[in-house]
């Protein structure tokens, strides 16, 4: 796994453009985001919260919110997409993922798929997977459109697992995490010579 500097999370931020040209920043969640993240989850539709958390939830429970805002603990990471709305940074999407070094896989819950694939590759992950309710047509359609294959989720008949091998090169999916990993690797290679 790539070593990340958790004391300087802003270096891993990416600035993207929405389809209509608006600036979208993708960055790791910070403890200062707790209230904004909770407001984001409260603003989701009941169905969206149900699909995202695989059951009923009106907001993030305090223990889950705490896990969301502490990046890197137990190799778990949360990122948000933000936009300026009436002059205020506003969360418009989120993704949560965990790196399993034994299997070189990233498990995720999302809204930011291509950027998440890039960030997973920067960890050295070779595969991404997620579980969703069999009734979550929107997530299944997104995963299918993005090239994910489907299997049964072990131990839970209500869920389906979607997974995809990760084969990316730095030029294919630009993200700050990948660029920093590439720089670190080339710097280490030049030191080894």
Image: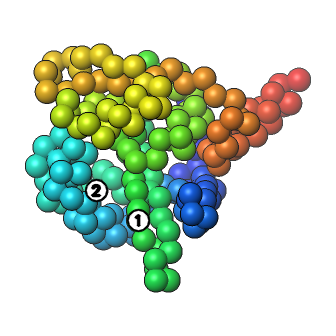
Q: Nearer the viewer, residue 176 or 67?
A: 176
Q: Residue at 38%, 44% (x, y): give it.
A: 110
Q: Is residue 71 visible?
A: no
Considering the numbered disc 1 on the image, is that residue within a helix, a strand or a loop?
strand
Residue designated by label 2:
66
Q: Earlier in the sequence, mark 1 or mark 2?
A: 2
Instruction: Give residue 43's quadrant in the image.
Output: bottom left
User: How many numbered markers are drawn?
Assistant: 2
Determine whether, in the image, residue 116 is placed left or right of residue 173: left
Q: Percent from the top left, x then y, of residue 67?
A: 30, 51
Furthest residue to the bottom? 87
Q: Nearer the viewer, residue 73 or 41?
A: 41
Rendered view: 4 above or below 134: below
Q: Nearer the viewer, residue 77 or 116?
A: 116
Residue designated by label 1:
91
Rendered view: 90 above or below 189: below
Determine whether, in the image, residue 37 is placed left or right of residue 30: left
Q: Residue at 86%, 30% (x, y): give it.
A: 190
Q: Residue at 81%, 27% (x, y): give it.
A: 189
């Amino acid at each position: 796994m790539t070593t990340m500097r958790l004391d300087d999370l802003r270096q891993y931020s990416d600035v993207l453009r929405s389809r209509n040209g608006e600036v979208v920043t993708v960055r790791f969640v910070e403890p200062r985001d707790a209230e904004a993240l909770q407001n984001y989850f409260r603003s989701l539709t009941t169905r969206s919260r149900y699909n995202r958390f695989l059951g009923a939830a009106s907001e993030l429970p305090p223990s889950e919110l705490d896990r969301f805002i502490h990046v890197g603990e137990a190799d778990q990471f949360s990122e948000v997409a933000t936009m300026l709305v009436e002059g205020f940074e506003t969360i418009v999407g989120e993704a949560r993922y965990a790196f399993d070094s034994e299997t070189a896989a990233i498990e995720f819950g999302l809204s930011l798929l291509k950027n998440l694939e890039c960030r997973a590759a920067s960890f050295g992950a070779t595969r991404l997977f997620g579980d969703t309710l069999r009734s979550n047509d929107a997530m299944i359609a997104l995963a299918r459109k993005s090239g994910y294959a489907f299997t049964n989720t072990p131990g839970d008949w209500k869920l389906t697992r979607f997974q995809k091998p990760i084969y990316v090169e730095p030029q294919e999916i630009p993200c700050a995490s990948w660029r920093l990993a590439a720089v670190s690797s080339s710097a280490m290679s030049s030191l080894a010579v």
